[in-house]
Image (tube, helix red, strand yellow):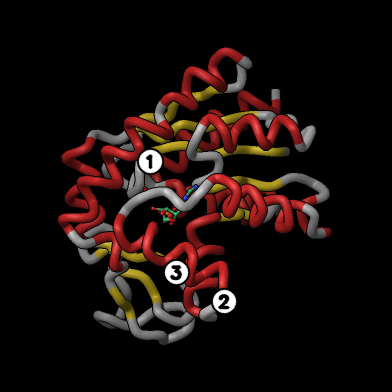
Amino acid sequence: MKLIFLGAPGAGKGTQAEVVSERYHIPAISTGALLREAMANGTELGMKAKSYIDGGALAPDEVVIGIIKARLAADDCRNGFILDGFPRTVAQAKALDEMDIKMDGVISLEVEDDVIIHRLGGRRLCSKCGSSYHVDHKPTAVAGICDKCEGELITRADDKPEVIKSRLDVYHEQTEPLKDFYAAKGVLKMVIGQEKIEDTTALTIAAIESIRG
Ligand code: AMP
């Protein structure tokens, strides 16, 4: 099964992708996480992406398309995958089409902007393994320490209040048109994001089951 998770930054794509990945035994692939990894490793690609990411802008299409092409060629993608945060522009969606990759379903997680602003402000990330938490909605057992690897939690540079607003603008201008793009293909499913993560998960699983028929 090949799925795309669409939605504003902070809509819960990564959180839901993690659960769905475990349930259906398919990898969740986050272009944001791949770019952050490249940044942490100080690679040329990472250096190139840093200014875009830290400023809340999208990395250039050709950069992320290259990353995703390489990742989808890996063995673990043979039985399907979840794309979390890719595509984010119509040009990226067309590049997927050109790779002859037909998506089974596109789940759009719908969350209001003011909820997003609160969520992203409280989001924390493990500096070691990249796991995502929230100070109110998904706290760690010990404050500031990752439950999974005991790494130190940090706030992403692009979760700073002044950057959140521009990321939302970018979402509405460049990514939201993908809903029409995939609706026209008959593969779009809307899921209304709920206050509780597990409630959104239940709706997401129901949408996926309707795709599986
Ligand atoms: P995310 O972790 O999905 O919120 O992504 C963090 C940042 O990485 C985004 O704000 C962009 O700067 C960059 N990024 C991630 N995925 C893409 C993509 N598909 N196209 C362009 N930039 C991306």
Q: Position of residue 6 (x, y in %)?
A: 47, 37
Instruction: Classify mark 1: helix, strand or loop.
Output: helix
Q: State which tag comes first along the sequence, 1 or 2.
A: 2
Residue 30 occupies quadrant: bottom right
Residue that numbered label 2 is attached to: 43
Q: In the image shown, does 153 or 146 lie closer to the viewer?
A: 153
Q: Quadrant of the N terminus?
A: top right
Query: What residue is shown with label 1?
Result: 199
* x 25%, y 55%: residue: 120
Name the amino acid type tagged 3: Ser
For the point 69% across and 29% down, which residue is it? 104
Label 2 neighbourhood size at 10 Å, few (<14), some (14-19), many (20+)?
few
Quadrant of the drawing holding the C terminus: top right
Q: Residues within 10 Å of mark 1 (few under 14, many from 20)?
A: few
Q: Which residue is mark 3?
A: 131
Q: Is mark 2 within 8 Å of ligand 1?
A: no
* Distance Cα–Cα, label 2 vs label 3: 21 Å
Q: Is residue 23 left or right of residue 169?
A: right
